[in-house]
Image (cartoon, rainbow, N blue to C red):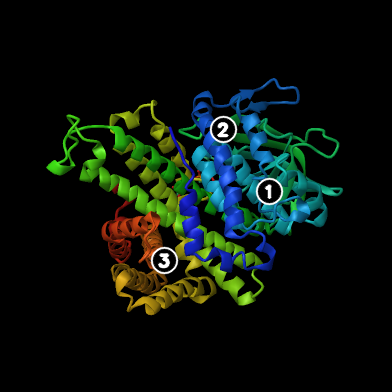
Amino acid sequence: MSYKSPIEDFKYNLAMLNYDEVIAGIEKFKEYDSETLMSVVSEIGRLNEQEVLDSNKIGDREGLKYVTDGAEGPEVHTPERFKKLYDAVKTSGYVGATMPTQYGGGGAPFTTAILAGEIGIAANMAFYMGPGLSHGAMKTILKKATEELKDKYLPNMTSGEWMGTMCLTEPQCGTDLGLIKSTAIPKDDHYELTGQKIWISFGEHDLTENIIHLVLARTPDAPEGIKGISLFLVPKRLDDNSRNTIYCGGLEHKLGINSSPTCVMNLENAKGWLVGEKNKGMEAMFLMMNDARLKVGLQGIAMSEISYQNALEFAKERKQMRSVVKDKQDKDSKADNIIVHPDVRRMLMNVKATTEAMRALCIYTAMKIDLAEDHPDEKVRQEADDFAALMTPIIKAYCTDRGFLNCSESLQVLGGSGFTKEYPLEQYMRDVRITMIYEGTNGIQALDLVGRKLTMHQGRLLQNFQKEVQKFLSENKDNEEISSFIKPLENALNEVTASTMWLMQNGIQDPENALASATDYLNLVALSSMTYMWARMAKFSVGKNEPIHKNKIKTGTYFVEKIMPELNMYSKKVQAGKSSMMDMEVAEF
Ligand SMILES: Cc1cc2nc3c(=O)[nH]c(=O)nc-3n(C[C@H](O)[C@H](O)[C@H](O)COP(=O)(O)OP(=O)(O)OC[C@H]3O[C@@H](n4cnc5c(N)ncnc54)[C@H](O)[C@@H]3O)c2cc1C
């Protein structure tokens, strides 16, 4: 098992996306120019490449222990090394890096969390789910809670002393949160919460003394459905350090992420405090979910990267068969390294070209989130927010679907070895599979894109994106050096326009048409966005001699020739509509 943080690629992306002017140019982030940012991220890279990476396999094999006779109720014990590791991560300042300095954070841009997060996830995805979710919880408290709650909870969460969770799911509701039954009854200055939550990541563990749960529940007078849900902060420990009545009722046994505790959480008159307005819990929770959705997309990217690195190392060492080209044959050996074979290169290039494009798109979106939150000009903030809102479901769904495919394709490079526990690929494939399901399944992300994001503000989100791409095309239409990227991008934009028109014409009068085409449409826009990223990378790299620039042109060329054409297929599928699936009677399945 090996992993090297993709520091050079991060630096490349920051330069290509003009980070120093766009983000470090904002007063609040002036101390975080790309050099400073990269020195912070490189330090995190060293910690993860050494200490955290080793713990990944151990965590997978050792798993978690559910102890029913703990001193204060059921306990969850994480793998032996995790406490020491968590303390090291805490000391590094990783947990609160992007939180405001007022609450003890580092005040860094969100982009930092995406760069550092990719490294952490690659080294140990299951372990980093804890700090990752905690970040979303902190952000929600920061934006929606009262000053009193912020002062009481944020400093300890920012320092990593305490961790946060999100408690939405119940046995009868996952996707459909309108079915939530947990109740919150007002009492004195607080509420008493009762109910059962399931599959709560890091709901109970021994890494921190206190755990701050954000729980969705209904007040007695709440309207039915999604409009009657409120959000509450429910700490494991109360002010006097006594236990609140929220306990872990058991752990799930899962396909992967074996060291991430997935807990049943039972609440019996547990003390909680309202976060945000009553009955506006979903709005508050969306703050956490959007953050978490981007980070889940990042999990797909990180797992693609580490799988690729392992596959590449194997392909350069394993010798099988001969190259069909005599000059390429190794004269000192009876067989050649498998990397000489075109089909092995096809697999490696598929992973490399998609991973680099997904990373560029994710960093670009993270920068837009920084602009949306902190740019002084309202118009810039609004346009950036539109971009991030449009890309969130795309990154969540596309990068995790592709992340799983990329882990599978990397495993394939190892042949039978990939299927064995001698190598880490089988674990990566098991671990990454959940990313397509949690934080809203990928099917639901597609519905969010087509049903909400496309129609929001009379279609402004997509129109702004189309305008941005069109502007790039107009500026570069005569640039012969990158014409091999410009033409595919024109094609991509045309296909997005045609499929969007089709959806507007056929989806409004018959919504099943829109829903039937939603996933194909999401893949179409994702591949178009990635083609745009490759065109921008080509523009940045063309004519430069350093190896990374030559490498980008070659990798981008592979993308536009061998992967981008998939988008024409998706466009065709969108426009085929619903009938071939909806004409089937249930009994005919
Ligand atoms: C390991 C793990 C960790 C988790 N961590 C957390 C956590 O920390 N906090 C938390 O609250 N939850 C957590 N979850 C729950 C997770 O978010 C849900 O599993 C997920 O949202 C899907 O809900 P569900 O499993 O009930 O599937 P269901 O909602 O039952 O959906 C089943 C299938 O039907 C599809 N479907 C449903 N409705 C529609 C529709 N209208 N149109 C099209 N398709 C539809 C879905 O896409 C899916 O394929 C976790 C789950 C797991 C497995």
* Element carrying mark 2: helix
Q: Residue 103: image x %, image y %?
A: 77, 52
Q: Earlier in the sequence, mark 3 or mark 2?
A: 2
Q: Residue at x 57, y 26 (%)?
A: 64
Q: Residue at x 45, y 33 (%)?
A: 255
Q: Are marks 1 and 2 in contact (CB under 8 Å)?
A: no
- Residue 232 at x, y percent in the picture: 72, 49
Q: Nearer the viewer, mark 3 or mark 2?
A: 3
Q: Based on the displayed image, in which of its 4 quarters is residue 243 positioned?
A: top right
Quadrant of res 450: bottom left
**First in sequence: mark 1 vs mark 2:** 2
Closer to the camera, 21 or 138? 21
Label 2 sits on residue: 51
The quadrant holding residue 584 is bottom left
Residue toward you, 421 or 345: 345
Q: Residue at x 24, y 37 (%)?
A: 338
x, y percent for residue 312: 34, 40
Q: Amino acid at mark 3?
A: Phe
Q: Identify residue for label 1.
A: 96
Q: Is residue 443 visible?
A: no
Against 265, is 449 above or below? below
Q: Nearer the viewer, mark 1 or mark 3?
A: 3
CA–CA distance in space, label 1 to label 2:
20 Å
Mark 3 to mark 2 CA distance (whole Å):
35 Å
**Residue behind mark 3:** 540
Which amino acid, by three-letter code, is at mark 1? Gly
